[in-house]
Image (cartoon, rainbow, N blue to C red):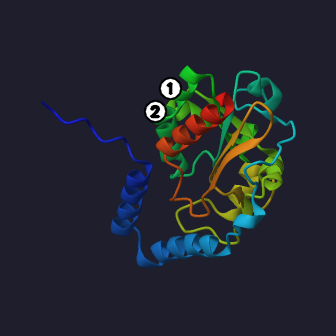
């Protein structure tokens, strides 16, 4: 009898991505990437980000396919899981979003919980590429000018971009900000009362929330709501 397979790990995929870079990138390129990630971790201030118990005011965001993502409408069906990512061409994001589609989205759909991925990448600059590339079964929305990310305290401006990734000028074009400002990868769960019930922010873009942790948080939210 075969043993039950281990759950898919996003961390393992990121470790494999980094290992490939160690194998193929030149040392200066790799060092810049590592140093940038270390600097973001060192600069991260957990007190500056949104907290469990905070109230989220209503917002509406452009959907990558031309519609509108409206928080009030989403919450009418139950809690909402917001996943912030950097941009459609980000290698780590192209691992993370399909992973969440496979490992998280089916369970959320069965439980009446909505999943939305959010990036400052503008719709007209190709935001939908990441949804179409992976046939994602959840909405992808544009946080224009990082307004929502700033409200949650999770945005950062990076002065240098590692070689092999878009230059700050390219990033400014994709996001419309003219700067290398991104949201830190984050998962935020908002309940039907507009209250934040779970927050996990990852200043290192190769360290993101695993699906089981999100599902466990949702189980705890439902248990408390039923008590």
Q: Position of residue 72 (x, y in %)?
A: 82, 28
Q: How many marks?
A: 2
Looking at the figure, which quarter contains the N terminus? top left
Q: Left or right: where does residue 21 sit relative to residue 84? A: left
**Answer yes or no: do the residues labelled 1 and 2 have beta carbons within 8 Å?**
yes
**Numbered disc 2: secondary structure:** helix
Can you name the residue that lies furthest to the right here?
A: 57
Q: Quadrant of residue 44?
A: bottom right
Q: Position of residue 42 (x, y in %)?
A: 62, 76
Q: Position of residue 105 (x, y in %)?
A: 53, 30
Residue 157: tell me if it is visible.
no
Residue 172: tell me if it is visible.
yes
**Numbered disc 1: secondary structure:** helix
Residue displayed at 70% across by 65% down: 46
The residue identified by callout 1 is 106
Question: In this orientation, which residue lies closer to the viewer: 92 or 210?
Answer: 210
Can you name the residue that lies furthest to the front here?
A: 227
Callout 1: 10 Å neighbours few (<14), some, many (20+)? Answer: some
Which label sits in the foreground, 1 or 2?
A: 1
Q: Left or right: where does residue 10 sit relative to residue 148? A: left
Relative to 158, say whether 57 is above or below: above
Q: CA distance from mark 1 to mark 2?
A: 7 Å
Looking at the figure, which quarter contains the C terminus? top right
**In the drawing, what numbered circle is on residue 102?**
2
Residue displayed at 82% across by 42% down: 56
């Amino acid at each position: 009898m075969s043993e039950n397979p281990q759950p898919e790990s996003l961390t393992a995929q990121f470790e494999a991505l980094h290992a490939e870079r160690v194998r193929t990138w030149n040392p200066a390129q790799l060092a810049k990437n590592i140093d940038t990630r270390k600097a973001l971790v060192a600069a991260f201030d957990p007190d500056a980000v949104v907290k469990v118990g905070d109230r989220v005011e209503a917002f509406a965001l452009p959907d990558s396919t031309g519609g509108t993502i409206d928080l009030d409408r989403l919450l009418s069906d139950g809690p909402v899981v917001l996943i912030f990512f950097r941009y459609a061409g980000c290698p780590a994001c192209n691992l993370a979003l399909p992973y969440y589609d496979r490992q998280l989205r089916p369970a959320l759909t069965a439980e009446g919980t909505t999943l939305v991925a959010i990036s400052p990448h503008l719709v007209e600059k190709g935001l939908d590429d990441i949804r179409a590339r992976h046939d994602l079964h959840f909405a992808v929305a544009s946080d224009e000018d990082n307004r929502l990310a700033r409200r949650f305290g999770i945005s950062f401006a990076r002065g240098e971009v590692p070689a092999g990734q878009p230059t700050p000028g390219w990033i400014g074009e994709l996001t419309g900000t003219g700067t290398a400002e991104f949201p830190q990868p984050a998962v935020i769960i908002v309940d039907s009362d507009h209250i934040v019930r779970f927050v996990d922010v990852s200043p290192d873009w190769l360290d993101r929330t695993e699906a089981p942790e999100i599902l466990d948080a949702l189980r705890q939210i439902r248990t408390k709501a039923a008590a």
